[in-house]
Image (tube, helix red, strand yellow):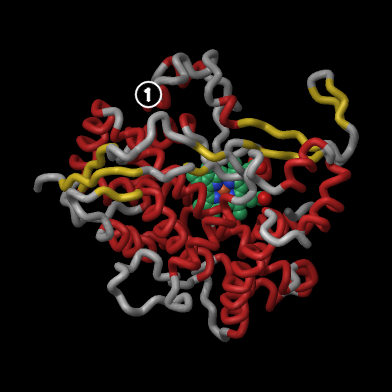
Amino acid sequence: MCRGSTWQAMRNVIISIYQPSHLASLIPAIQPYIEQAGNLFCPGEEITFSDISIRLFTDVIGQAAFGVDFGLTKDTDDAEKIIHDAPRDFIQKHLYATTSLKMDLSGSLSMLVGTFLPALQKPLRQLMLRVPGSMDRRMDETNAALSGELDAIVAERTAQADRGQKNFLSVLLNGIDTSDAMRKLFTPDYVSALTYEHLLAGSGTMSFTLSSLVYLVSAHPEVEEKLLQEIDAFGPKDVVPDADDLRTKFPYLEQVLKETMRYFPGSPVVSREATADVEIGGYFLPKGTWVWLATAVLGRDPEQFPEPEAFRPERFDPESEECKRRHPYAYIPFGIGPRACPGQKFAFQQLKLTVIHLYRRYVFRHSARMESPLQLQFSIVTNFKNGVKLQVVQRKN
Ligand code: HEM
């Protein structure tokens, strides 16, 4: 994690990339991946939706953030795969990296102990790295392998003469080329680490949110019907909504997305470290104290979300009494303050485009193999223990 002036400089680069005017121009680059992913669904078949979803958003972030085609949504019959012709391996490494920071007993021993006794975390980690098969060692090996793939992308982009301004990595490297201050802050190792952070931040959360939405909508026919009506009313199936359409013409879809993120938040906790001694709400926090904010717990507060166990998108209708009454900080799926998620608008844009594309063609039903209740696995990003298993139903017309 980066701090202070380095973080501020990095943040400025990210913000410039994910501002609305640039986001609009990303739609034509993203839509082909959504369509490719849509072609992986076979009507009548049972699928593990979450597997396809992680492929989709890894491809999208590959294109939007690094200008690279990972080729993960290409049909497996397509011979040409961009990353070493082995997308499965890449996905496995990536998935493993996004899920291995578990906070349960099967997670890293050093992390688990470090949560309660921070001073022991570092020495214990050094010890566990020497133990073959330990979670610490497996995490280390996986991270090294995945970073290697990303380092190769960074090296290739760095050597490129005309990178354009279309993706995060190019904008960052262009800045480094033209500014001494940027060059000092962003060493090659640091650029690789940022690239890695981007991949992790922008794919696991997205995949989890889309899969949760489809899972929840499949179990709520009244929500599905209203959603389909809104999507169908937009126009012919082959007309791709532009950024303005996505912002203004799909208010119910926006409510469904927000309720999904309340019900199943992709980031269950947000953390901060006190950089100086501070007193908050009568509690003294010495410098260096870690504070964890549980967004998942906030979202189930019955004061702010009456009947919190009910999946009810209408509670996010801006005209509803419930929405007007709600405390502004009761709902923070993207975090809060100057460090809040810079990808929030991009996330909404991608998720809306994908939901519209999929629901124009299909509806989904829970597979008989889908466990109930759904088993979740909590880490920095929430995940499904056993995936979201659904049956694909082709829509008529
Ligand atoms: C549903 C999707 C997403 C959710 C729920 C989500 C959630 C979050 C949360 C809770 C944080 C921490 C905020 C805080 O500490 O206050 C965060 C940080 C971040 N997110 Fe997202 N995010 C999503 C999608 C994305 C996407 C698509 C991108 C990139 C394109 C992205 C890039 C980042 C980055 C770079 C940070 C670190 C920011 C910093 O440290 O200044 N996120 N995200």
Residue 305 is left or right of residue 295, and the answer is: left
Q: Tell me the residue at 71%/55% (across/down).
A: 136
Q: Is residue 237 above or below residue 308?
A: below
Percent across and percent down for residue 147 are 63, 68
Q: Nearer the viewer, residue 88 or 166?
A: 88
Percent across and percent down for residue 280 are 81, 25
Residue 27 is left or right of residue 61, and the answer is: left
Q: Nearer the viewer, residue 110 or 232?
A: 110
Percent across and percent down for residue 291 are 75, 34
Q: Tell me the residue at 83%/51% (across/down).
A: 124
Q: Tell me the residue at 51%/47% (across/down).
A: 205
The answer to whether any part of residue 180 appears in the image is yes
Q: Secondary structure at mark 1?
A: loop
Q: Residue furthest left?
A: 397
Q: Nearer the viewer, residue 334 or 196?
A: 196
Q: Nearer the viewer, residue 220 or 161?
A: 220
Q: Amino acid at mark 1?
A: Arg
Write down the quadrant of residue 339 in the picture: top right
Q: Is residue 336 above or below residue 241?
A: above
Q: Which residue is mark 1?
A: 312
Percent across and percent down for residue 314 are 36, 24
Q: Is residue 95 above or below residue 285?
A: below
